[in-house]
Image: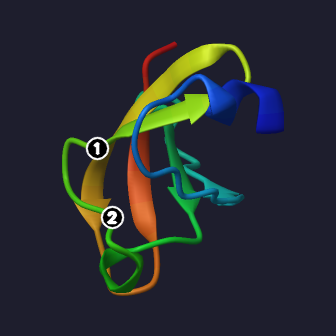
Amino acid sequence: MNEVTQVIAGEVLSAEIINVSPDPYSKRVLINKGANDGVFIDQALLDASGLMGQVVEVLPFTSWVMLIT
């Protein structure tokens, strides 16, 4: 991940997936960063391979991300 963040211009915030939506049709994951960390709706989520998803709901300490797969 350190190599990936070196080519990204701007601020990078690392997060962990702490939950996966049980709904098989939604493809959402919960991350451990939220509004208190500066996360906002429509923010992109990246992994080592590139774009992973987009933030669709922000709570104070967590956020839901819709996966693009």
Q: Give the residue drawn at x 39%, y 43%.
A: 10
Residue 53 falls left or right of residue 29: left
Q: Give the residue drawn at x 70%, y 26%.
A: 4
Q: Residue 60 appears in which quarter of the rendering?
A: bottom left
Q: Residue 36 appears in which quarter of the rendering?
A: bottom left
Residue matched to label 1: 43
Residue 24 falls left or right of residue 26: right
Residue 15 falls left or right of residue 24: right
Q: Give the residue drawn at x 69%, y 14%.
A: 49
Identify the secondary structure beneath mark 2.
loop
Q: Is residue 68 above or below residue 23?
A: above
Residue 30 falls left or right of residue 61: right
Q: Position of residue 14 (x, y in %)?
A: 63, 56
Structure colour scheme: rainbow
Q: Does the residue at mark 1 contact the one at mark 2 (Cβ under 8 Å)?
A: yes
Amino acid of disc 2:
Val
Q: Residues within 10 Å of mark 1 (few under 14, many from 20)?
A: few
Report the residue that reaches farthest toward the right.
Answer: 2
Mark carried by residue 39: 2
Q: CA gap, disc 1 to disc 2? A: 7 Å
Q: Position of residue 32 (x, y in %)?
A: 59, 71
Q: Residues within 10 Å of mark 2 (few under 14, many from 20)?
A: many
Amino acid of disc 1:
Gln
Can residue 1 be seen by looking at this rendering?
no
